Image (cartoon, grey):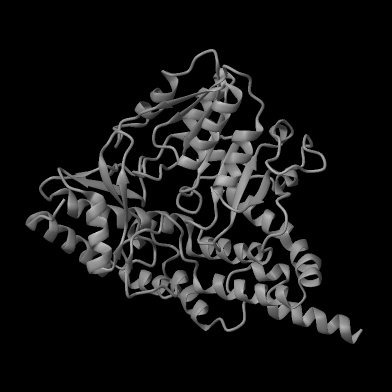
Amino acid sequence: MFFKDGRRAFLKTLGLTFGSLKFFSLEKKADASWLETKIKEIENLDPLDVAQDESFWFHVQEAFDVDRSLINLNNGGVHPAPRLVMQALHRYLDFANAAPTVNSWGYIRTRREFIRQKIAETFGCSPEEIAITRNVTESLQIVLLGIDLKPGDEIITTTHDYPSMKNALFQREKREGIKVKLVPFPYPALNKQELVDCFAQNITPRTKMILVCHITNLTGQIFPVKDISQLAREKGIELVIDGAHSFGHLVDQQKDLDCDIYGGNLHKWMMAPIGTGFLYVKKEKIKKIWPLFPSPDPQSDDIRKFEHYGTHPEPIWLAIGEALSFHHTLGPKRKEERLRYLKDYWAKALAILPGVKILTSFNPELACGLGSFTVEGRDMLRLSQILMDKHRIHTTAGILPDGVPFMRITPSIYTTLKELDYFIEIISHYIKTGWSA
């Protein structure tokens, strides 16, 4: 009896009970309680107004242990987790490491179903439609490589879709004789119909699948997924949604997208530990998708068949729970509007500078927190390197598929306006004085 009671108490201190998925249920929660108090003070205000309330966001910023010796404007790559998530992760890792086959397999692994349920609640679907993966690349490659196609079948995607996904399609093209059709689109788009038309005008009787980013990683263009989903369904075409940048960024759930297949990252805008993602597949479609890693029954309709990827750090699953709770307590719409406000803040300041073109829409239906810009005749890759080397401002830059050089800027909820002001000041200086190509 003593052993059972002692074990129960010990697990409770580790946060291994279902109650640990409630926000701020951890030990040493003084800073968390302070933030929760501030959230209650603004909970009845319009999210658009809260987005500009710097006194409130100061307390959110303090929830992160980030390196303030640099200005990180590349949160779209991998996002730092809040302090509470990292504290939970460390606790779960220590517990698992003490006796891995007993603690990790015996206790932590069984809690995976609670996390599956929490992800499903957030996305608005059944837990039996959610597979927990390591990232969105794994999620989508399960589908892109797992749906049966015949030689000559076509898949449509855009020139801006993520390289890992396009590489999966190109491999099928080389190996199986399917046809991959890459279509361009106007950026920033003037309206949603332009984006729907880029698919509608390229559909043929051989089109069997469409792959589309909900938010593109290059310019932050939001695609009207629901409209594209309806188009695909009318034509009998499978639609696969890349939600790498939308889950935890936008408030949309499955019903808002009307989608059947969606892959999401948890370590980007949901701010869970690095190496976490999920795959949503509508229940009746699970059976037709072969798993990427073979399972005992690869043609079953059990979503868990997609999780047979061998030994991996299971403790990070539990820390997903803290990230989801942080997201919901902060308020998904408040978070979305703050991200959009920060993008508009820097983009509108740069838009008036000579030679600058903002590649991301200011229409709230067509863009949110991820934005890009270019400067006419300038080497954006070099500028990005200068920003880091001389000013400790971290961005990412490259060349768009049509040859346009660009820089992507992704501040987040822990970013201060003073940091953005400094970024704007430095960019203004280099545009006015020039920099070597």
Residue plotted at (57% across, 39% down): 255
Give the image location of residue 278, x and y in percent.
61, 49
Q: Is residue 243 above or below residue 334?
A: above
Is residue 260 in sight in this rendering?
no
- Count of labels in the image: 0
Residue plotted at (68% across, 74% down): 15
In which quarter of the view is residue 90 placed?
bottom right
Q: In the image as oriented, which residue stretches furthest toward the front?
A: 174
In which quarter of the view is residue 46 placed?
bottom left
- Quadrant showing the N terminus: bottom right
User: Quick check: 437 left or right of 141?
Assistant: left
User: Quick check: 117 left or right of 202?
Assistant: right
Give the image location of residue 179, x and y in percent.
52, 22
Q: Closer to the camera, 145 or 35?
A: 145
User: Quick check: 105 left or right of 321?
Assistant: right
Q: In the image as oriented, which residue stretches furthest toward the top?
A: 205
Is residue 51 in sight in this rendering?
yes
Q: Closer to the camera, 346 or 34?
A: 346
Q: Closer to the camera, 335 or 96?
A: 96
Residue plotted at (70% across, 40% down): 291
Q: Is residue 235 above or below residue 185?
A: above
Give the image location of residue 104, x and y in percent.
75, 68
Give the image location of residue 142, x and y in percent.
63, 40
Q: Is residue 259 above or below residue 432?
A: above
